[in-house]
Amino acid sequence: MQKFKFLSTFTAIGLSMTLLFGCTNEEVSEPVDAAAPAEENEATGGSEEATASDTPKNVIVMVGDGMGLGQMEVARLLEYGKEGELHMESLEHTALLRTYSANNWVTDSAAAGTAIATSTKTDNGMIGVNPDGESVASILELFRNDGKQVGIISNNTVTDATPAAFTANVETRAGQDEIARQLFEREYDLMLGGGSNYFQPDRQDGDDLVEMFEEKGYSVVTDRDELLAADSPERLLGLFHPAFMNYKVDMDLYESNEPTLNEMTDVALDMLSQHEDGFFLMVEGARIDHASHAADITSVWQETIEFDNTVADVLSWMEERDDTLLIVLADHETMGIAASEVMDKEALRNVSASPEYMVGQFEFDEENGVYLTASVQSIIEEYSGVVLSDEEVKAFNEYIYDDEGELRFPHEQAWEIGSFIADHYQAGVMNRDIRAASATGGHTGNMVPVFATGLGADRFNGVLDNTDISHIIAEISQLETAPGEVEK
């Protein structure tokens, strides 16, 4: 595979997103072996073996879920204009990442997270296991075995696909109750995000896992105030929402007291850096993906900017240090988001609620099983400025039922509202019929970006596979074992 030396940003070299259709497992090479000499390891770009002087004490992996180059460009334009720059684009080393799973050329977050965390290709829907269902070791586990502190942060649930890929082993991503149980049993140092429902007695055979964490000596926090008041505890569990945390655009509407991704990360860095042996931290900006599924361009912008501002905070924390490796990447791209020429940027900046919030405000006619036309029209106009016709509301009321006649989940109903708004403002996004036909809800095979800075960052260049990431980290860090080994 030809390797390229990239300039400091993707914009500077005019890279384009590439769709990987028709690629079979036989047509791609096996993941690289972290134990192999560096000069024989294609993913390293020919670098020599790491030495003690360039081995990072701390490793931070930041994942923008569903964040392709289109999401980045939309966010950059809406936030800064055409001459602006995202913080992540300033990192010295860049690469592109292929994302296919073991059983599909388009991955879901479970298989993608598993590939990144364990260097193992698995089937869509599987977490921390190979296609045979065997548990495989993650890079986070290897760092803990090496005496490091470890933590995960997500503004999704802490039990969802990406954080779980680093911390759990289950054959289906639907098993979030089991993932919560594994988090309790494995006693990781820091876990911050949503998903408190999965720790409750009704999901845990009568056990209150939150109380049980406290009995183990964890500091447990449930809102922004409690998190910011936490005084560098030894171990910390923060659960800030029953499910996934709110979109940034909806925070004031819900009068939410949830911490931001920036605040969770700042607390984590303060806590984990107190330990002399160093740490491994995974930070996920999860709701970029959710916004993309919903064709919610406004939230794509705001969620990507929050993630990028968190990158800036980490870079600021690293300024006085020379012992840390930072990798910023995406797990896959969602909905083919693009910065179209005719996109109405000003109108999209003025949308003041997510489609999910709007759906929650619609008045439902129980007798006829539909949302009232006037209610749908008034709510959408209030928050987005879009005026729907009676025919469009009728089409929406038909969409809210699936092929079996069952009412779709509210977030799936919101996908259609988001598409109405995106179409009206001429944003670049995948056709809703393709989304409906997609087993992943609209993921694509587009390559996604990787940015890196710090010790060993020069190894992240060229075109990589998602299974390369943890192998390279393990080699740079001189870990004794490789990610992806089958756990006994």
Image (spheres, grey):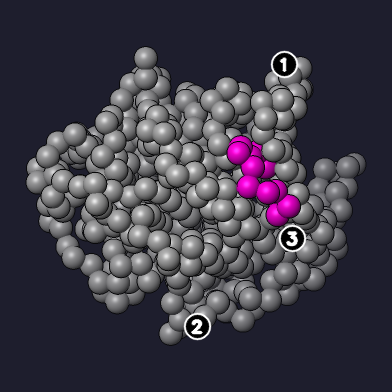
Which type of secondary structure does the marked residue at label 3 adopt? loop
Q: Identify residue for label 3.
A: 251
Question: Is residue 62 shown above or below 304?
Answer: above
x%, y% of residue 245? 68, 49
Task: Identify which residue is drawn at 45% across, 72% down.
Answer: 86
Residue found 80% across the figure and 71% down from its top: 382
Please indicate whether residue 219 sits to the left or right of residue 35 in the image. Answer: right
Judging depth in this view, the residue of 155 and 445 nearest the camera is 155
- Left or right: 49 as drawn, with respect to 176: left
**Residues in magenta?**
227-238
**Label 1's element?**
loop
Query: Callout 1: 10 Å neighbours few (<14), some, many (20+)?
Result: few
The residue labelled by disc 1 is 205
Residue 247 sits in quarter: bottom right
- In this rendering, the answer to whether 142 lies above or below 436 is above
Give the mark nearest the N terminus, 1 or 2: 2
